[in-house]
Image (cartoon, rainbow, N blue to C red):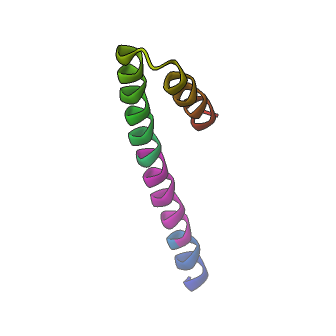
């Protein structure tokens, strides 16, 4: 029974970590999209390219 409890707790910990990772990833994507919009509005081509490259690596 103890082995099952340890396994269950480990799985819960992994699930919580996955949820947290996804939340952080979604937050970062939103920030990058906002920065891309700002770069487009400012005509910042270098910033736009850097941010879109970062977004591509984040979405892999």
Residue 35 lies, with reference to residue 42, above or below; the image says below
Q: What residue do we see at 45% from left, 51% from top? A: 19
Q: Residue at x 49, y 66 (%)?
A: 13
- In the image, residue 36 sits, relative to residue 43, either above or below, namely below
Which of the pair 53/18 is nearer the observer?
53
Q: Position of residue 8 (x, y in %)?
A: 53, 69
The answer to whether residue 18 is magenta is yes
Name the quadrant of the N terminus: bottom right
Look at 54% across and 62% down and name the residue there. Answer: 14
45 to 35, vertically: above or below: above
Label count reads 0
Q: Residue 49 location, x and y as percent?
A: 57, 23
Q: Residue at x 55, y 64 (%)?
A: 11
- Nearer to the camera, 50 or 16: 50
Q: Which residue is more in the foreground, 8 or 49?
A: 49
Q: Measured along the vertical axis of the image, is residue 1 above or below residue 19?
A: below
| First to last magenta residue range | 10-23
């Amino acid at each position: 029974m103890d082995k099952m409890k340890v396994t269950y707790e480990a799985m819960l910990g992994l699930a919580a970590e996955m949820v947290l990772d996804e939340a952080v990833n979604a937050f970062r994507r939103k920030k990058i999209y906002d920065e891309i919009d700002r770069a487009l509005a400012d005509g910042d081509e270098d910033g736009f390219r850097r941010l879109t490259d970062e977004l591509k690596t984040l979405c892999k």
